Image: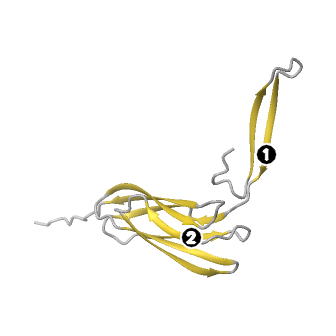
Amino acid sequence: MNTRNKGGHTIRKHATLFTNDEKNPRLQLTINGSVDRFVTIKPNRVKLRGVAGDEIKRKVTITPEKKYPFKIVKASARDGKDIHFELSEEKGDEGPVYALVIENKRLQQGRYFDMITLETDSEIQPKLSIRVYGDLRQRTVEKKEQSQ
């Protein structure tokens, strides 16, 4: 059962079990349970939208759950050619909170995708991923009417 991005929710999965028992050739199984939240990432994906050439930045807050403390030991971008990012550790009420500021570097219009991977010192979840979407439009130039 995949519990990715299901932290803080109750999940349920159904399965059919086939047996060689004549009285019970088929059994329906249901598995359900609560999934602990490991981390809160807000927002969990970043959209860098705007005019090509303008400053476009977004901040992501990464808060480890008290029950599962961890430190981020490394951050890297899958591609990195269209974005720049900085990771800093801040003091939170119940431990460290991380701030990830992501900035668009691309100067021409168009769309792009990248992924920032955060490596942690946790055995439970050694990597966290943040998707970054860029959508840049061209600056529109207003035309003045010429009077003759």
Amino acid carrying mark 2 in the image: Ile
Label 1 to label 2: alpha-carbon separation: 31 Å
Left or right: 80 in relation to 100: left
Mark 2 or mark 1, which is nearer the start of the sequence?
Answer: 1
Q: Residue at x 41, y 62 (%)?
A: 49
Residue under pointer 2: 72
- Residue 21: percent from the left, percent from the top? 86, 21
Q: Residue furthest left?
A: 148
Most extreme residue toward the top is 22
Q: Residue at x 38, y 64 (%)?
A: 50
Amino acid at the residue labelled 1: Asn
- Could you tell whether 4 is left or right of 138 in the image? right
Q: Which residue is mark 1?
A: 32
Point out residue 53 in the picture as x, y percentages from the top left corner.
30, 68
User: Residue farthest to the right?
Assistant: 23
Quarter of the rendering occupied by the C terminus: bottom left
Q: How many discs appear? A: 2
In this picture, is 8 found above or below 90?
Answer: above
Which structural element holds mark 2?
Answer: strand
Q: Say whether residue 86 is left or right of residue 39.
A: left
From what the image shows, is residue 1 above or below residue 98? above
Q: Position of residue 138 (x, y in %)?
A: 29, 60
Q: Nearer the viewer, residue 24 or 120?
A: 120
